[in-house]
């Protein structure tokens, strides 16, 4: 969409130049009075192209969205201490992150990164 807004601005600039030439040409003794109408129509069209360029630029930069994921646990939940699988150091809540839908843990002591897997309860 950025290319569309750039093209729109360039076409509007060219149309403004030619519209002013038509308006200037209509006033002389050798000019045609209908050129004034063409010049005014060209200025109106160039305004429309500039407006379209602003709209294309707005489409090119959509507002950023923040996704917040909340987990609703059923019943009472008891939390055990989580320890690193490699070095046995206790892990803090800041060490657990959600990456591409998977729960990943990075140990702050040894730097090991692994995915948390949940074993069935039965």
Image (tube, grey):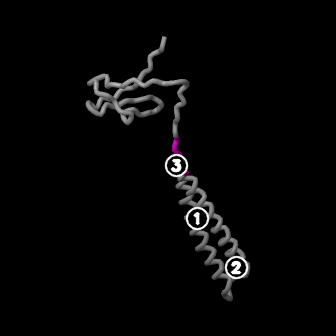
Q: Which element type, helix, strand or loop, lies under badge 1?
A: helix
Assess whether mark 3 and mark 2 are in contact (beta carbons under 8 angstroms): no
Q: Which element type, helix, strand or loop, lies under badge 3?
A: loop
Residues at marks 1 and 3, CA–CA distance in whole angstroms = 30 Å
Residue span colored magenta: 62-67
With respect to residue 86, does 33 lie above or below? below
Check disc 1: other Cα within 10 Å, few if <14, some if 14-19, many if 20+: some
Q: Which residue is mark 3?
A: 64
- Image position of 14 (left or right of 30): left
The residue positioned farthest toward the top in the image shown: 122
Earlier in the chain: of badge 2 and badge 3, it is: 2
- Nearer to us in this view, 68 or 54: 68
- Give the quarter of the image for residue 84: top left
- Which mark lies nearer to you, 1 or 3? 3
Residues at marks 1 and 2, CA–CA distance in whole angstroms = 20 Å
Q: Does the magenta run of residues contain 120?
A: no
Earlier in the chain: of badge 1 and badge 2, it is: 1
Query: Residue 115 shows which numbered tag?
Result: none
Q: Give how far across and how far down residue 45 sits, in percent.
A: 66, 67
- Nearer to us in this view, 62 or 84: 84
Q: Which residue is mark 2?
A: 36
Residue at (26% x, 30% y) in the render: 110
Earlier in the chain: of badge 1 and badge 3, it is: 1
Check disc 2: other Cα within 10 Å, few if <14, some if 14-19, many if 20+: many
Residues at marks 2 and 3, CA–CA distance in whole angstroms = 46 Å
- Which mark lies nearer to you, 2 or 3? 3
Q: Give how far across and how far down residue 83 sits, in percent.
A: 33, 25
Q: Give how far across and how far down residue 80 sits, in percent.
A: 39, 23
With respect to residue 90, does 36 lie above or below? below
With respect to residue 67, does 88 lie above or below? above
Main SS type for the magenta part?
loop
Query: Residue 11 shows which numbered tag?
Result: 1
């Amino acid at each position: 969409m950025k290319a569309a807004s750039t093209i729109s601005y360039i076409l509007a600039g060219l149309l403004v130049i030619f519209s002013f030439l038509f308006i200037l040409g209509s006033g002389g003794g050798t000019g045609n009075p209908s050129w004034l109408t063409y010049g005014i129509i060209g200025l109106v069209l160039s305004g429309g192209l500039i407006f379209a360029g602003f709209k294309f630029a707005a489409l090119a930069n959509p507002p950023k969205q923040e996704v917040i994921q909340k987990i609703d646990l059923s019943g009472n939940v008891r939390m055990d201490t989580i320890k690193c699988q490699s070095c046995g150091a206790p892990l803090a809540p800041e060490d657990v992150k959600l990456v591409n839908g998977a729960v990943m843990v990075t140990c702050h002591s040894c730097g090991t990164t692994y995915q948390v897997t949940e074993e069935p309860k039965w």
